[in-house]
């Protein structure tokens, strides 16, 4: 007698629902910004994203505090976590040859062990003046992170080891310093009850 509760789930069955949730968070954020940033496109961080990053974000021109980050390795470290948060920020521009996409930001993090929080661990914006979302990168990532956290029933979002120079900016946006754990600094923002 077969018992349906004993069926095994494949890796695809586990990963796919969270990939769909990430994409839904991306779509929700794009809807929020479509009036002011109509060229905004948010995606998961794919191999295509990493190839574009490697080809266009020259190491010497990246911000000195993050230029040592190897996004290929960062993605590999996070890929096994199906509940990870990730977003690539693109602009879409119509050209005579079709649609041209430019990569302007990357962010990735993990869900806490018990699913209480979604943690943003890495955030990097395109460091050059041509970034049309330069001042919007943080709000876009924060909003997408908030949507994702709400969709998986997390109660808060956390920023792990933020740049100390940016802590006042994050506090102005409603984050608070909560604790220090294993030499990591956390800024926390509780999500409103729906």
Image (cartoon, rainbow, N blue to C red):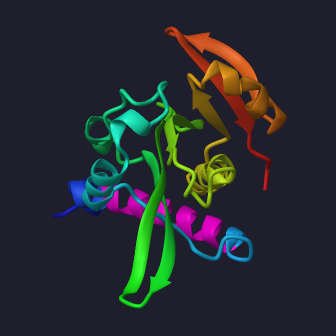
Task: State the image coordinates of residue 160 (x, y, percent, origin top left).
Answer: 56, 26
* Main secondary structure of the magenta stretch: helix
Q: Nearer the viewer, residue 194 or 159?
A: 159
Residue 175 occupies quadrant: top right
Task: State the image coordinates of residue 86 (x, y, percent, origin top left).
Answer: 45, 50
The single residue placed furthest to the left in the displayed view is 1
The single residue placed furthest to the top in the displayed view is 183
Against 106, residue 151 (above or below) is below
Whether residue 90 is visible: yes
Q: Nearer the viewer, residue 134 or 72?
A: 134
The single residue placed furthest to the bottom in the displayed view is 96
Task: State the image coordinates of residue 76 (x, y, percent, origin top left).
Answer: 25, 40
Q: Quadrant of the N terminus?
A: bottom left
Q: Residue at x 56, y 62 (%)?
A: 25
Q: Residue at x 27, y 63 (%)?
A: 4
Q: Nearer the viewer, residue 109 or 39?
A: 39
Residue 60 occupies quadrant: top left
Numbered range of the magenta stretch: 15-31
**Along the horizontal axis of the image, is 113 left or right of 29?**
left
Q: Magenta segment: does it hold 21?
A: yes
């Amino acid at each position: 007698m077969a018992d349906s509760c004993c069926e095994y789930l494949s890796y695809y069955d586990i990963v796919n629902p969270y990939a769909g949730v990430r994409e839904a968070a991306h779509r929700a954020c794009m809807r929020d910004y479509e009036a002011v940033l109509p060229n905004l496109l948010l995606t998961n961080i794919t191999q295509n994203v990493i190839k574009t990053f490697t080809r266009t974000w020259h190491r010497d021109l990246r911000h000195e505090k993050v230029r040592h980050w190897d996004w290929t390795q960062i993605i590999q470290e996070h890929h096994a976590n199906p509940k990870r948060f990730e977003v690539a920020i693109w602009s879409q521009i119509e050209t005579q040859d079709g649609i041209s996409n430019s990569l302007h930001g990357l962010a990735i993090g993990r869900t806490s062990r018990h699913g209480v929080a979604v943690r943003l661990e890495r955030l990097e914006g395109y460091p050059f003046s041509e970034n049309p979302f330069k001042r919007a990168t943080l709000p876009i990532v924060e909003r997408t992170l908030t949507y994702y956290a709400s969709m998986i029933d997390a109660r808060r979002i956390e920023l792990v080891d933020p740049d100390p120079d940016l802590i006042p900016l994050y506090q102005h946006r409603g984050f608070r310093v909560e604790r220090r754990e294993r030499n990591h600094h956390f800024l926390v923002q509780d999500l409103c009850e729906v």
